Structure formats: structure tokens, C-alpha cells
Amino acid sequence: MAFRLDVLTQTLHREVPLTRQMGVNVVGYDGDKLTATADFGPNVNIHGTAFGGSQFSICAVAGWAMLHLKYEEAGVQALSVLGDASIKYFSPVKGEIRALCHLPEDGTFEPFMKRVGNGERAAITLITEILSGDKVAARFQGRYSAFFE
């Protein structure tokens, strides 16, 4: 699994160069949850905390990475784009930025993947949380669309 996550991180760094500058790494995946981190140094703001735009960016990337792995597991060649997103910030982050994306628990993921597996366009909302210790520091909601070239 570590090799697979390293390959995904390399793909992100190559295809989205900003992720390399941010120090983004995909560090965990169990089929239901994906964890990505970003270095604190390049993402610090004038207050000495994690920049909100960096938190938004790593959340968007974590959702994309989750879908990338799910498509790979299903053997489909779908692509994803983020069509709509919002984030709520609850508390400052004063260290490594850790984003946790989890599959929805509302029963929408299976029908989404069925449509994608059939080669149809589909959309899904994913939630990604920024964690500071054990506390949720921000919550991102992103609507991703799957399509085929």
C-alpha cells in the first residue's frame, strides 16, 4: 500500500505542481478514508498558523485522490473535477496540515460508482476534515464530477 500511496503522491506532484510546493503527501488509505498531509513551513500565514487557502487546497486534493484510488480499484478510467466546494474553519492549525477524507455514509457512493463503472457521468459530495491533534479544525465539502475523455 505504501508504494501505491507514493505513486499517487508523485502523480499529484507531477500533474498539480502546487502540491509539491505545499509538501503534500498521501500518507494513509484504508478503502474508506484517505489521509493527506502538507508541510507547515510553505503553508504558514502572517499569524503563524496554516493558511486557509492551503487548507482548502489540500482538502480538494484529498477528495480527488480518494476518487482516483476508488476508480483504480474498480478498473475504470474516469477523471474527476471539483465543481463546487465550501469550507468552514473552526480553529487555527499550528503545525503539519492533516486532511482526512472519508466516503459518505449516506448511501450515495455505491450508486455513484455504479454509474461511473457503466461509463456514465456522475457527481458525488465528499467531506474532508482538517485535523489539529484530535480536533477538527476545518470541514470542507466538495462536489466532484466524474467524466470520461
Image (cartoon, grey):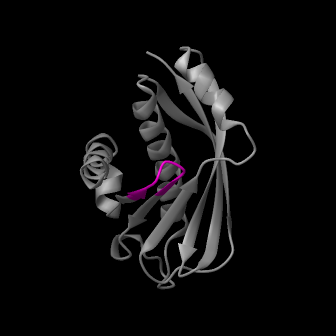
Q: Is residue 59 above or below residue 114?
A: below
Say which quarter of the image contains residue 139.
bottom right
On the picture, is 108 further left or further right than 2? right
On the picture, is 84 further left or further right than 148? right
Q: Position of residue 116 (x, y in %)?
A: 56, 22
On the picture, is 111 further left or further right than 62? right
Q: Is residue 94 magenta?
A: no
Quadrant location of the C terminus in the rendered image: top left
The count of marks equals 0
Q: Residue at x 75, y 44 (%)?
A: 106
Frontmost residue, 31 versus 68: 31
Q: Is residue 25 above or below residue 137?
A: above
Q: Position of residue 103 (x, y in %)?
A: 61, 48
Q: Residue at x 55, y 27 (%)?
A: 146
Frontmost residue, 92 versus 3: 3
On the picture, is 86 further left or further right than 63? right
Q: Residue at x 50, y 71 (%)?
A: 51
Say which quarter of the image contains residue 128.
bottom right
Q: Is residue 78 above or below residue 93?
A: above
Q: Is residue 26 above or below residue 111?
A: below
Q: Position of residue 136 (x, y in %)?
A: 63, 73
Q: Position of residue 145 (x, y in %)?
A: 59, 30
Q: Residue at x 35, y 62 (%)?
A: 22
User: Which stretch did the figure color magenta?
Assistant: 28-34
Q: Is residue 30 magenta?
A: yes
